[in-house]
Image: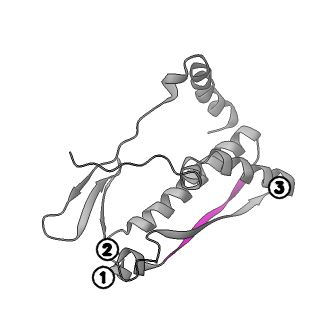
Amino acid sequence: MDRDELRERQGPLKERYRAEPTTAVVTLRAEGSLADSDVSCSVQTGRALVEAGLHPATGGTGTLACSGDMLLQALVACAGVTLRSVATNRGIAVTGTVHAEGDLDFRGTLGVDRSAPVGFRSIRLSFELESDASAEDLDALIATTERYCVVFQTLAHPPQLSVARR
């Protein structure tokens, strides 16, 4: 997709969202099915069924997807798509890779140490970019990606969360 095609697709959407802000609010959904006997949960991604299970550091075999890995993968995917969109809009030719890594202390999730956090202590996102663009343009590209990446911003500014049994 080139810049003109992207703008052609996004232009009417942006116009509509400015005129009717409520139409920009979309509820995304995910659903998983609990396994009958395994410690796993099958999640439909829209493209394939992913079976998530325990990380080896919590007793898993490593054959099932780890939800922590999936979170980092979602961050990489979102940042990569956002960067490509911004680069396309700015006419910047860029290729490369996006990396995410995060630190977990499994004592928290296993209840070994109540003072150990449950979840990631830190997450690092990085880009290895190849481009003829200037360093300033690439820095601005990354800053804009950070600003508009949905997953990054959700992690940086957590939304109101709730849990319920239905």
Furthest-front residue in view? 115
Q: Are marks 1 and 2 in contact (CB under 8 Å)?
A: yes
Locate residue 2, reporting x and y percent: 66, 38
The amino acid pointed to by label 1 is: Gly
Q: Residue at x 72, y 61 (%)?
A: 129
The C terminus: image quadrant: top left
Residue drawn at (46%, 68%), measured in percent from left and top?
Answer: 119
Name the residue that disc number 3 marks.
Answer: 132
**Residue 56 location, x and y as percent?**
35, 81
Dot 1 corresponds to which residue?
59
Q: Is mark 1 in CB contact (under 8 Å) with mark 3?
A: no
Task: Tell whether 24 sits left or right of 65.
Answer: right
At horizontal 60% and vertical 48% (from top left) the residue drawn is 149
Q: Is residue 126 one of those drawn in magenta?
A: no
Q: Which residues are magenta?
A: 94-104
Mark 1 to mark 3: distance in Å?
Answer: 47 Å
Residue at coordinates 60% horizontally, 29% vertically from top-left? 10
Disc 3 packing (10 Å; few <14; some 14–19; many ≥20): few
Element class at badge 3: loop
Numbered circle sitting on residue 54:
2
- Three-letter amino acid code at the position of disc 2: Leu
